[in-house]
Amino acid sequence: MNGNYTFSIIKPNAVRTGKTGPVLAMINEAGFEIAAMKMIRMSVSQAENFYAVHKDKPFFSSLVEFMSSGPIVVMILKHTDAVDEFRKLIGATDPANAEPGTIRKLFAVSLQMNAVHGSDSDENAIRECDFFFTPEERFL
Ligand code: IDP
Ligand code: MG
């Protein structure tokens, strides 16, 4: 993976409200290539597993409920310095603090329903890509 890949989710609030296309357009315009992509719905136990790092946080059960509440789009994205470049494109976790023009500023409806996920390190990008995709499902 070596820094050229990150993992992203278009979260249930954004898929539900028809923002999949606009979010993908922003990802495309920012120069990311889609190496893998599918629409799925996480089970509660998958969401618990995916967000295990947050299991002691007060928002954990609510986050798991939200993330398993409907379809999501999961993707592997390719770009130079992918993790950091994608975090810049999505903006701060809390949309109130996100820079103008970022995906979260445009499409988040709350701190929890902040439209997209992006890996926070190369190590987590690898874990998250492997969590959702087999080698046969990757194309770049
Ligand atoms: P990140 O998605 O920007 O990496 P994290 O701190 O890893 O942010 O949190 C994971 C997700 O949990 C956030 O994207 C958001 O959906 C949710 N979240 C984070 N902090 C809170 C909170 O204080 N209340 C409710 N939901 C939160
Ligand atoms: Mg995070």
Image (tube, rainbow, N blue to C red):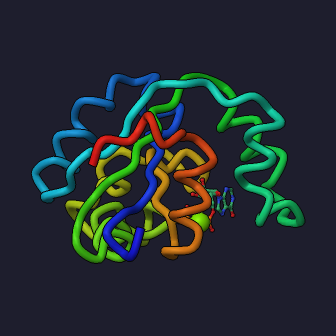
- Residue at (60% x, 23% y) in the render: 70
Q: Residue at x 65, y 38 (%)?
A: 67
- Point out the residue furthest to the right here: 56
Look at the image and tell me in which quarter the N terminus lies.
bottom left
- Give the residue furthest to the front: 136
Compared across the picture, whether 49 is left or right of 87 comes to right
Q: Residue 91, image x and y in percent?
A: 36, 67
Q: Nearer the viewer, residue 7 or 24?
A: 7
Front residue of 139/98: it is 139
Which residue is pictured at 45% across the width and 45% down the height? Answer: 115
- Residue 68, located in which quarter of the rendered image? top right
In this image, 64 relative to 3: left or right? right
81 in relation to 50, above or below: below
Where does the image place residue 46, in percent across and percent down from the top left? 75, 38
In this rendering, position of residue 29 left or right of residue 27: left
Q: Quadrant of ligand 1?
A: bottom right
Count the labels in the image: 0
Q: Which percent across, then down, holds residue 104? A: 37, 55
120, above or below 65, in the image: below
Up-down: is 119 above or below 22? below
1 lies left or right of 100: right
Residue at figure coordinates x 32%, y 31% from the top left:
19
**Front position in the image: 140 or 57:** 140
